[in-house]
Amino acid sequence: MKRLWWLWCFLLAFGRLPAQGKIYRVWLRADRDTAIVGDVVHLTAEVEYDESLNIRGGLQAFAHPSLDPVGSVEVAQTDTLVGGRYHNIRIEQLAAMVMLDSGLIVVPGVKFFSDASGDTLMTRPVKIFVKPVLSVKDPPRPIKTIIREPKRADDYLPWIIGAVALLMLVLLILYLRKHRPEPIPSPPEVEEKYSSPKEEALMELGWILSSRLWEKDPKEAQLKMSRILRRFLKAKYGIPALEMTSSELSRSLHKQLRTRQRLALMRLLRDADMVKFAKLTMPADRHRQSIEQAIAWVKDVY
């Protein structure tokens, strides 16, 4: 007995009893119990076990369909004494999870195990209530009034350009309406045919004189007078006066007209040709006198 007692004292003083491999405690906790969809929740798993064991499992083997792990699992190892005798090891495993679904999320317990000792311990599950981004019960927050950017001078430039262009267009239309040539009146229509070439020529020449056509269009007034006289000569003497030049017409009328009458006619036709082809400008009195002379010539010849 004394030998056994001395052996026991020797072991207590200079050694220790061989330790039995064992897992002592396991924990699982979250840094919050409520979150919003999209928040990141950090999980911590801890295990305390004998140093002679090789521990596996925990968050490193954790998988859950409602959670996505962020980054890798971090492991922190510390030494601790249990009962003042056994040299044990404590490991903390850290992981970050993204909350993807709303409602009550139950994170199941994680399992630690050792093949050497056959020990298997599982932590308690962790409950996290995840709220949606906008709660149905909460009324929507009032939308703030939109702050409009103050107007600058450049912002009004397109409107100013448009207004100026519109004003110029209106002024142009008014100018064209004011200065557009008045329509040339047409000779009155006669239901019955003229009784004679003289009556026809005098009626049309009288209309040019009464309407003062030369004030609106001098060229047209002289052209009409020339055509009236040529139609009168064609109807009276049967010559193609409308297709003949003034010189040809003078030679053709050498026998039909007196010298005075022929010279007066040529003077009227040449003045009309000068206004028509040479763009001769005559005063208004000269145009009026030409029409009056043409009327007097027709009366004299007939």
Image (cartoon, grey):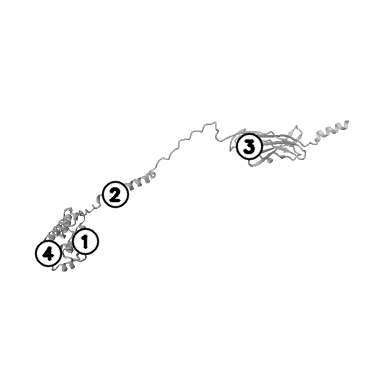
Q: Nearer the viewer, residue 159 or 270?
A: 270
Quick check: 225 above or below 58? below
Callout in the foreground (2, 3): 2
Q: Earlier in the sequence, mark 2 or mark 1?
A: 2
Q: Say which quadrant the C terminus sits in.
A: bottom left
In the image, which disc is placed on residue 276?
1
Does 267 sit left or right of 149 as displayed? left
* Kind of residue indicated by mark 1: Lys
Sort mark 1 into few (<14), some (14-19) or many (20+) by Cα contacts within 10 Å.
some
Instruction: Find out whether the residues at labels 2 and 3 contact each other: C-beta distance under 8 Å.
Output: no
* Kind of residue indicated by mark 2: Ile
Q: Alpha-carbon distance for marks 2 and 1? A: 31 Å
Quick check: 164 above or below 194? above
Q: Earlier in the sequence, mark 2 or mark 3?
A: 3
Q: Earlier in the sequence, mark 1 or mark 3?
A: 3
Q: Nearer the viewer, residue 198 or 126?
A: 198
| Quarter of image, res 103 | top right
Q: Return the residue at label 4.
A: 261
Q: Alpha-carbon distance for marks 1 and 4? A: 23 Å
